[in-house]
């Protein structure tokens, strides 16, 4: 096909940062013409979407094609090149940008080739680092948990749940801090020796306590519940007892009527999965009335049963690189999704 676009230039010009906004009627008509011959992938009252386009480029001496999508919203086309970046096109009299003109013309040229030579022509052109799929965590993670240990933890947790423990009436600030301290001691052991519950909280928690630490009567359940139901803490993270820069860390929620008068412990960033499990074990050992709704999901992750999305952002993501090592080590374990193929209008 002899692409006219070099991969490095495409990557430099169409950045993932702020999109370039092209206000040129000629360019707008080019995008309109690109979409005219194929049926939309999705369409509703607000916008129309096509996920079936490809931009040819030359990378390291090889011809490749990169998936491209187009969304039309009102009078603007939003063009997104997978893992590269995006730009916007609307009508106007600004000077045309020859590079972006070439991007659309090249995508149109490949679309015509797909129609004449067969849609599967892109199968040979799209490299696997620009395709999506899924792979089980056991092929990606190191130091997997044995399934026997998973079953032991689940059995222990279910036995604990069968006791139907409850902190009727909720908790006071001191009671909450003592339960949080039990979590810290179970997870961090010698690192918290000699520290009181408040010291531990200051060391590991998010820090935005939303007024929780200002409760005057630390032994009063009524005062804690008054603070909790007052909602002053909304937008803060008083219950994120282990802080994480990425998403959230570990939350310990106080017992309320809505959660069955049980403390609830959750982990969001699975980098803290081991810490979370140690805390769960500590709460079981101390007969604390609690629930861990995501426990089985965490255990599935640690035993490698969770699927990771390949080359696509998700809760668990794995990036595939075009190297001999990755092909030998991971390729056979990945379930690749089929490429989007245009549905031609009659």
Image (spheres, rainbow, N blue to C red):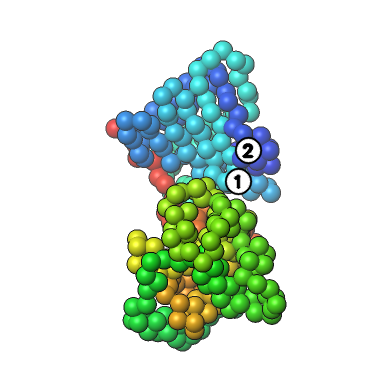
Residue 297, image x, y percentages: 44, 69
What secondary structure is marked by label 1?
Answer: strand
Residue 246 has which mark?
none
- What residue does disc 1 label? 63
Foreground residue among 207 and 108: 207
Q: Residues within 10 Å of mark 2 (few under 14, many from 20)?
A: few
User: Which quadrant would the C terminus be assigned to in this image?
Assistant: top left
Residue 295, image x, y percentages: 44, 72
Q: Residue at x 41, y 24 (%)?
A: 74
Q: In terms of image quadrants, where is residue 311?
A: bottom right
- What residue does disc 2 label? 17
Foreground residue among 298 and 6: 298
Q: Residues within 10 Å of mark 1 (few under 14, many from 20)?
A: some
User: Which quadrant would the N terminus be assigned to in this image?
Assistant: top right
What secondary structure is marked by label 2?
Answer: loop
Whether 252 is drawn above or below 41: the answer is below
Foreground residue among 291 and 303: 291
- Looking at the image, the residue that sits furthest to the top is 93
Residue 110 seen in the current view: yes
Residue 334, image x, y percentages: 49, 65
Whether 22 is drawn above or below 39: the answer is above
Mark 2 or mark 1, which is nearer the start of the sequence? 2
Q: Residue at x 56, y 31 (%)?
A: 87
Whether 78 is drawn above or below 247: the answer is above
Q: Nearer the viewer, mark 1 or mark 2?
A: 2
Q: What's the distance in space between the residues labelled 1 and 2, CA to CA? A: 26 Å
Foreground residue among 245 and 340: 245
Residue 343, image x, y percentages: 35, 40
Count of marks overlaid on the render: 2
Q: Residue at x 45, y 81 (%)?
A: 287
Residue 319 seen in the current view: no
């Amino acid at each position: 096909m002899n692409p006219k676009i070099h991969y490095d230039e495409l990557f430099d010009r169409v950045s993932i940062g702020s999109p370039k906004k092209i206000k040129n009627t000629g360019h707008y008509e080019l995008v309109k013409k690109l979409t005219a011959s194929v049926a939309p992938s999705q369409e509703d009252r607000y916008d129309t979407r096509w996920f079936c386009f490809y931009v040819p480029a030359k990378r390291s001496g090889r011809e490749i094609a990169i998936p491209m999508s187009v969304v039309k919203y009102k009078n603007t086309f939003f063009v997104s090149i997978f893992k590269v970046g995006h730009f916007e096109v609307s009508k106007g009299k600004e000077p045309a940008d020859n590079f972006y003109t070439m991007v659309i013309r090249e995508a149109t040229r490949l679309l015509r080739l797909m129609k004449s030579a067969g849609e599967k022509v892109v199968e040979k052109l799209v490299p696997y680092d620009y395709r999506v799929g899924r792979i089980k965590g056991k092929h990606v993670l190191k130091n997997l948990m044995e399934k026997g240990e998973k079953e032991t933890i689940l059995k222990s947790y279910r036995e604990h749940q069968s006791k139907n423990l409850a902190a009727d009436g909720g908790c006071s600030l001191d009671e909450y801090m003592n339960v949080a301290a039990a979590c810290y001691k179970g997870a961090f052991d010698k690192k918290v020796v000699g520290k009181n519950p408040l010291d531990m909280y200051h060391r590991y928690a998010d820090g935005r306590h939303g007024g929780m630490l200002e409760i005057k009567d630390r032994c009063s359940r009524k005062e804690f519940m008054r603070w909790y139901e007052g909602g002053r803490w909304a937008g803060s993270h008083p219950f994120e007892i282990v802080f994480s820069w990425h998403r959230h860390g570990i939350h310990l929620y106080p017992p309320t009527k809505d959660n069955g008068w049980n403390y609830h412990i959750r982990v969001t960033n699975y980098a803290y999965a081991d810490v979370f499990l140690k805390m769960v074990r500590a709460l079981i050992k101390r007969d604390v009335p609690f629930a861990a709704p995501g426990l089985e999901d965490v255990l599935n992750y640690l035993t490698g049963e969770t699927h990771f999305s390949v080359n696509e952002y998700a809760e668990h993501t794995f990036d595939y690189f075009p190297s001999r090592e990755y092909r030998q080590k991971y390729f056979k374990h990945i379930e690749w999704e089929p490429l989007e193929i245009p549905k031609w209008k009659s």
